[in-house]
Amino acid sequence: MNVPIDTTTRTYRWCDWTPRLPAPRRGTANARTHGVAVANDGRVVVFRQADPAVLVLGPDGTPLNAWGDRFLGAHGLTLVQEGEDEALWLTDQDSGEVAKTTLDGETLLQLDRPPLAVYEDGAFAPTWVAVFEKRWGGNGDVWVADGYGMNYVHRYDRAGNYLGSITGEEGSAGAFDCPHGIWFDTRREESELYVADRGNRRLQVYDPEGMFKRTVGADVLGCPCAGAVYGEELYVPELCARVAVFDADDQLIRFIGRNDAVCERRDWPDLPAEDLRPGLFNSPHGFAVDADGSLYVVEWIIGGRLTKLETS
């Protein structure tokens, strides 16, 4: 169903792609869609808690490929550019796996759990990866958010060697509470590492060396999951139940698909299909933007939902 969405600065058409997602072999009782990315050629990659976990769709939503039988705790999906090649970083919240793969599923690198005393008894449950890519003047460092474990964000070099960690206590904001999603923001002269400090309802911002700089959105965010940059705008999917859009100065511009009341329902997020309304989000978890400015949102709901907001 196509529903016009007017966001003042742009108008989108709401397109539900969920019926085109291939049925899982395992994980049917879950299959939550957690991550999404768009490759340079327009292919859309979805990461879900099922077997297969990685779905590759054409620009029109046609299923092209599916792989990944070991990611039943599938969580964060990050697409990176390495010269002319692209790769994926995948995190599994259950197994603790952090893997770099090709878009066809070949494993290129796996990161070890950090050698810290906190993990002698504590769980390592990684939720997302950010890479300081060369195209942004970066050194290839890999940052891993342990959002469902010990609330650390860990730093590795491009070869997978552990370098250090941050906890949120480096600056004035205080300790992370579920550092859920992380990404490099490239809107300014110097790239910055953003952390969706979900439990604290804010973003924390660091320089590429892990030095704290500031917080963003503490007065407007409710449940930030991740982030994606397009042009001068930052898009932040919020689990309860909207996408926040910030300008180049990190000031809130608008919400897209806002549906706050849905989070008050006892059956949230797993509403019956007839109660999932086009034009309103239920539980945004992952977000991506393609070269044309169309938006892609995956939601934390059993069976999953993939929505494309096409520019019009």
Image (cartoon, grey):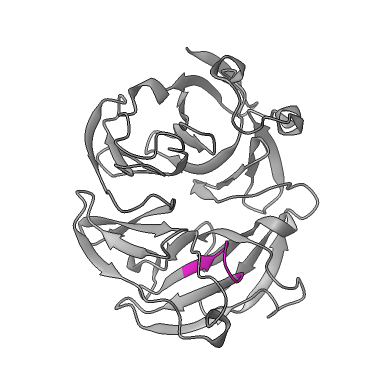
- On the image, the x and y values in percent for residue 268 come to 66, 32
Residue 62 picture quarter: top left
Q: Is residue 136 magenta?
A: no
Q: Over which residues does the magenta segment extend? A: 144-151
Task: Specify whether 184 is left or right of 131.
Answer: right
- On the image, the x and y values in percent for residue 81 come to 30, 58
As displayed, is residue 222 above or below residue 261?
A: below
Q: Nearer the viewer, residue 301 or 175?
A: 301
Q: Nearer the viewer, residue 237 or 76?
A: 76
Q: Residue at x 19, y 48 (%)?
A: 104
Q: Nearer the viewer, residue 83 or 75?
A: 75
Magenta stretch, overall SS: loop
Q: Nearer the viewer, residue 133 or 237?
A: 237
Task: Specify whether 195 is left or right of 2.
Answer: right
- On the image, the x and y values in percent for residue 30 come to 46, 38
As displayed, is residue 202 above or below residue 272?
A: below
As displayed, is residue 188 above or below residue 213?
A: above
Question: Is any atom of residue 312 visible in this view?
Answer: no
Q: Residue furthest right?
A: 219
Q: Residue at x 47, y 59 (%)?
A: 128
Q: Residue at x 39, y 70 (%)?
A: 137
Residue 55 picture quarter: top left
Q: Is residue 145 magenta?
A: yes
Question: Is any atom of residue 214 visible in this view?
Answer: yes
